[in-house]
Amino acid sequence: MQDGICVLDFAVEDSSEDSAEVFSIVQEALEIAVGVIANADDSLGMLSEVVEELIELHAKSAQRAKPDPLVLAEWFIAFHETTEVDYFELDPVAYSKVLGEDGLARVRAWAENADAFRRKYMEKRFAVLDQNVEVIVRTHLAEDGYVVFFEGLARALEEIGEYDAAWEYAKRGTESGSDWQARSCGQYWVDLARKWYPEREEDVAKQVLSTWPFLEAVLYPERLMQL
């Protein structure tokens, strides 16, 4: 399967390929993969990983192929309403340029009446698309402020260029405890500093590694190579 993903990835990036044909092939592959995972043992998560990669490729190929916005919107909706599996989501932000005003309006209208799980996810992503900080904070912290939601909120704020706000929530999540969720938030905080505040990375890393010293191998693998 991974070989097939690599071939599709290359085709999506190759400007000499027929973009409409590549898009059609990727879409069919995604639909087949979803059908397979519905009837397979995916306890190791390998099939889910393939589906996630195909979802990413589908959005990228749509950017090149530029299918009809309303046709894409209906397919987008149908993907979420399948009875086979219900734990994969398409991101309206990734499709926003192709969907355009009309396609996005159709998806928004559907999302408002979707089941609670889908509706919450779409509210978060449309808040990012609209670059509405107030709504982003409200939708991401609606679940009582658990650490995992601090990281999700910080990532959403980074996505729209609100780096200072992302920093504050990443810091809050990291300092909230020592469980795996806080650890994940800490790892993200270091990455955030590395990208946008390099002069502060050393201090952040020192704080994070004081709680989870084993993360050094993940954050700075080159240090192990020097031993």
Image (spheres, helix red, strand yellow):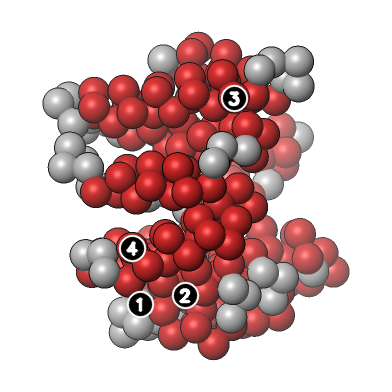
- Contact, CB < 8 Å: mark 2 with mark 1? yes
What secondary structure is found at the residue carrying circle 1?
A: loop
Q: Which residue is mark 1?
A: 146
How far apart, in angstroms, are the residues tagged by discs 2 and 4?
Answer: 28 Å
Do tag 3 and tag 2 residues touch (Cβ < 8 Å)?
no
Neighbour tally class for label 2: few under 14, some 14-19, many 20 plus, Cα within 10 Å: many
Where does residue 91 sit, x and y in percent of width and height?
Answer: 47, 53
Q: Residues within 10 Å of mark 1 (few under 14, many from 20)?
A: some
Which residue is denoted by mark 4 in the rendering?
A: 110
Work out whether residue 47 or residue 224 is closer to the camera in this orientation and state it: 47
Provide the residue designation for mark 3. Answer: 20
Residue 36 locus on image (x, y percent): 24, 23
Q: Nearer the viewer, mark 2 or mark 4?
A: 4
Nearest to the observer: residue 20 or residue 177? 20
> Where is the C terminus found, in terms of image quarters?
top right
The amino acid beneath tag 1 is: Tyr
Whether residue 161 is situated above or below residue 26 in the rendered picture: below
